[in-house]
Image: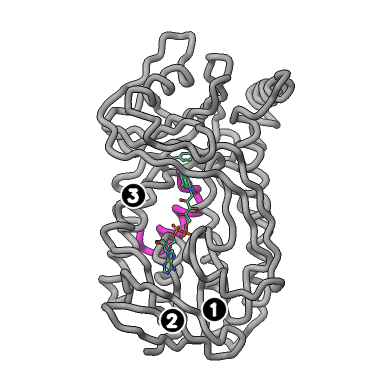
Amino acid sequence: MRTQVAIIGAGPAGLTLSHLLYLQGIESVVLELRSREYIEHRVRAGVLEQGTVDLFRSAGVADRLDRECLVHHGIELLFERRRHRIPLTELTGGRAITIYGQQEVVKDLIRHRLEAGGQILFEATETTLLDLHTSSPRVRFRHGGEIHELQCDFVAGCDGGHGVSRTFIPPGAVSVYEKLYPFAWLGILAEAPPATDEIVYANHERGFALHSMRSPRLSRLYIQVPRDEPLERWPDDRIWEELRLRLGTDDGWTLNEGPIIEKSITAMRSLVTEPMQYGRLFLAGDAAHIVPPTGAKGLNLAVADVRVLAEALTAWYREGRDDLLAAYSTTCLRRIWRAEHFSWWMTWMLHRHEDEDGFLQRLQISQLRYVCTSRVAAASLAENYVGLETV
Ligand code: FAD
Ligand code: PHB
């Protein structure tokens, strides 16, 4: 088997890259570890930046997104039992965020790729990357019970935070910067109309909580729990009780409850791999960097990476230029470090930390008050949240 670009992983990064390359007449094969059914139903992100939506539109894959998404012009910060609105659109010259589930993005991209004759091999296992330092790398994998070998010009490692691509880079060839947090998010999807028009981020003495949504009938909610917390400790009643406490306000607001249709725990970490390239292997998305979800940046960074990579590969194939490929990592890392900082800062400001005498909590409340009363501080949060055009 031969292709131009072998893409490992059919998440938002891998699928978007495959589609952008197709639009430029460049062939790719996507190898995905899981089944199509599994990845089309994996509940994760929900907030798309303006730039991400604009890219999907210009790439012609936003038809269903445009029909079904929810556009939000602000977010709310809740502390000391009061909500404060950050008017994102007003503060950013008209930019907004879009609520549309990641699994819907994945479904749309898979459909567009397959309709255009694109090749996605689901349930491809034992993926091994070979000869990355030559001009003809190879990918060996098992599919349909047999071992195959894919020859290519480039490999794009888009296989997420638990993928294998990164492991084929020899130790010492890249640096990894990492921070683990001592807490996690327990997330639920519930058949309940959202009791809020906009996303609410809550700082509460019992821990962080987030009220988001997927549609006028589906709420997406999260609470901070200790790292390595077993899910069994959280029967549905306990989750609702905790959400009621942490999201409660003094103005009589009530949470809408309903059947929980998905429940999972996600560890929180920050990680950056530098550079994001080794020979003919280019890492993109979570395979190269992780952010805690508090800033809603992960999927958006993944899409931003592959936009840069698709342009660089196009310049290589069309004009024989390698300067954009050489600059890929440096170009992406500017945006990535800004998002890393923003996500770390939001995480710090909103979560409950080890804090014996309450010093950190007082700093958090002071910071939250500042963000909610100073237009300049609010504008800084807003421009980072909707996504900076230049970094
Ligand atoms: P992934 O989506 O992880 O895709 C990688 C793919 O590679 C997967 O399909 C995987 O099965 C496959 N794979 C793994 N190993 C192999 C292998 N060996 N061979 C082949 N394939 C392999 N981001 C936002 O922007 N906004 C949000 O609101 C937001 N909220 C989040 C909430 C939660 C609870 C979580 C967990 C994440 C959230 N994120 C958010 C982050 C976002 O989900 C990720 O950043 C995003 O999925 C990254 O996309 P990706 O394509 O790089 O990786
Ligand atoms: C979500 O809707 O899943 C969501 C919203 C905001 C975040 C993270 C996740 O910061």
Left or right: residue 275 compared with residue 2: right
Write the residue at 58% across / 87% down: 319
Q: Nearer the viewer, mark 3 or mark 1?
A: 1
Residue visible at 55% across and 44% down in the picture: 268
Q: Nearer the viewer, residue 229 or 8?
A: 229
Residue stretch rendered in magenta on the structure:
47-61
* Residue 51 falls within the magenta-colored stretch: yes
Among the two numbered marks 2 and 1 on one chain, the one whose residue lies closer to the N terminus? 2
Q: Disc 2 versus disc 3: distance between alpha carbons?
A: 27 Å
Instruction: Tell whether position 375 is magenta.
Output: no
Q: Pointers 2 and 1 in contact (CB under 8 A)? A: yes
Q: Position of residue 141 (x, y in %)?
A: 39, 79
The image quarter in which residue 120 lies: bottom left
Residue under pointer 1: 313
The picture places residue 343, in percent across and down from the top left corner, at 61, 43
10 Å crowding of disc 1: few (<14), some (14-19), many (20+): many
- Is mark 3 in CB contact (under 8 Å) with mark 1? no
SS for tag 1?
helix
SS label for mark 2 = loop
* Mark drawn on residue 26: 2
Q: Is residue 216 visible?
A: no
Pointer 3 residue: 66
What count of labels does the image hold? 3
Q: Secondary structure at mark 3?
A: helix
Q: Amino acid at mark 1?
A: Leu
In terms of image quarters, where does ligand 1 lie? bottom left
Name the residue at 40% across, 87% down. 149
| Mark whose residue sits in front, 2 or 3 | 2
Disc 2/disc 1 C-alpha distance (Å) = 9 Å
Amino acid tagged 2: Ile
Question: Quarter of the image containing the C terminus?
Answer: bottom right
Tell me the amino acid under the disc marked 3: Asp
